Image (cartoon, helix red, strand yellow):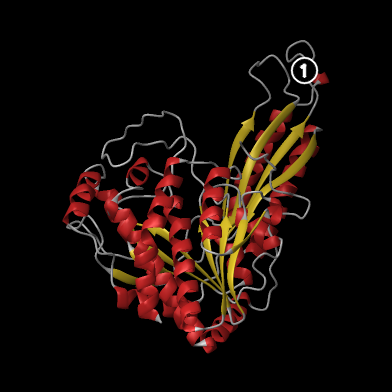
Amino acid sequence: MKKDVLKAVEDKAPAYIKLADSIWDTPELCFKEFKSSAMQMALLGREGFLVTKGLAGMSTAFVAEAGKGGPIIGFLGEFDALSGLSQDAGVAVQQTSTPGANGHGCGHNLHGAGAMLAAVALRDVLKAHGVEATVRYYGCPAEEGGSGKTFMTRAGVFDDLDVALNWHPSSFSTVKAFPSLAVIQAAFRFTGKAAHAAAAPHMGRSALDAVELFNVGVNYLREHMPDQARIHYAVTDSGGTSPNVVQARAEVLYYVRAPDIHETKELFQRVKKVAEGAAWMTETTLEVSTSRGCSNNIYNKVLDDVMYDNLLQLGPPPFDDVDREFAAEIRKTFSEEDVSFNALNFGFPSQSSKVLSDDVVREAPQLLGGSSDMGDVTWVAPTTQYFGACYAIGTEFHTWQLVAQGKTPAAHKGMIHAAKVLAATAIDLIQNPVIIEKAKENLKLMKSNRPYSCPIPPEVQPPSYAEAC
């Protein structure tokens, strides 16, 4: 079955390369990925999957299912882009024919297409061998700043999954076990009373003063929070541009992060108390609006072991000299510090002599400084994630260099290779259901019997957008 699924990936690959390139050509921002999600749903419908759209109140979120009985194996895919990252494809200089437009700076054009390829190939092989299992592909919108999977997790979309399989394009091939930081994002809006700042300052109540006092108070809080916690902010409304007016409104946006979602919620409450104190001191009113949140990622050693074994059997993607030639041109745009940081971030030693990775590694668990809505999925379903080499060594996420490489033959090879890793891992799990039970026990152990606690309040809903024509 494993040999057959690898062949099925190869046979099906051309259609999914075309899909990945089409999504690259149509970069859409979070919650508005109407064309990208429609392309994915259309292809899965043609493949015979039953598609259900509009999950968790998001018109671009969907699930496609095939097969029946057996374990439920879920593949997760993304398709949103980033603003202002437009870049021409296949050139090793920063240039764009569409200045200011969106761009696929995190490889999500490959992400979803590769996961779909794995799901379809797996379904075909299971059907051919008469093996019962349920295969699902989840179209997950708004990873970039929208917490799409968090809304989906809160809605119970992943509750009945036996296993979740994920991957992400990168510059190295690794099973990356990364505990991540949970995050809560909230806007703190202060409302005061306007007045003439010279003639009647005593009649005013400054909302901007409240923001400044709030920020100072949080700075003092930093000494008394866990070492790995992070708090950062941006003033999004200073109340106007006239110094001679006591500002009646002001707003500051905060990110509160910690290694555990429960710890993050506790820290967030402390931050709120500081804001309330600032409002008391300035006689202003305070409104707190939570808009986004992600739980910390729980890695699953049992599943990681299975995926890494398959990665070892497959080896790295089959890059050739033409791939290396273009990667070398991209490599010239990086400093040695860029290259070293990129390598160490994925558990590799310095890669000064290579332009594309031809190694595989099993990285020891290390805390990821950022946050991801994948974390919420890992709290409800055993999850493993493969990072697949698609780009030149030194390429960081959210850069023009990554966008430039999004349609290259090397990126396509990396995507196909990722589909093989995911599909082969799924075969092992279906043929050895005891592994799935061990993975579930591992999840319970890592959670310490604590239930999932969504970081987004129940009253907060994802934004609703009408579909574009």
Image quarter hosting the C terminus: top right
List x then y, in percent, for residue 357: 26, 61
Please determine whether, in this image, residue 201 is positioned above or below residue 117.
Answer: above
Q: Is residue 99 visible?
A: yes
Q: Which residue is disc 1 drawn over?
A: 201
Q: How many marks?
A: 1
Q: Residue furthest top?
A: 199
Is residue 360 or residue 285 the one in the foreground? 360
The residue type indicated by label 1 comes to Pro
The local crowd at label 1, few if under 14, some if 14 to 19, many if 20 or more residues have their Cα within 10 Å, is: some
Badge 1 element: helix
Side (left or right) of 15 relative to 454: left
List x then y, in percent, for residue 197: 73, 15
Image quarter hosting the N terminus: bottom left
List x then y, in percent, for residue 193: 81, 24
List x then y, in percent, for residue 451: 70, 72
Is residue 154 or residue 223 the one in the foreground? 154
In percent of the image, x 66 and y 21: which residue is there? 240
In percent of the image, x 57 and y 57: which residue is there? 139
Please determine whether, in this image, residue 63 is positioned above or below residue 165.
Answer: above
Please determine whether, in this image, residue 3 is positioned above or below residue 222.
Answer: below
Q: Is residue 181 visible?
A: no
Please determine whether, in this image, residue 353 is positioned above or below residue 210.
Answer: below
Is residue 261 or residue 464 the one in the foreground? 464
Side (left or right) of 91 relative to 186: left
Q: Quadrant of residue 210?
A: top right
Side (left or right) of 346 relative to 262: left
Side (left or right) of 354 relative to 203: left
In percent of the image, x 47 and y 83: which residue is there? 129
In percent of the image, x 35 and y 72: which residue is there? 7
Is residue 430 or residue 273 the one in the foreground? 430
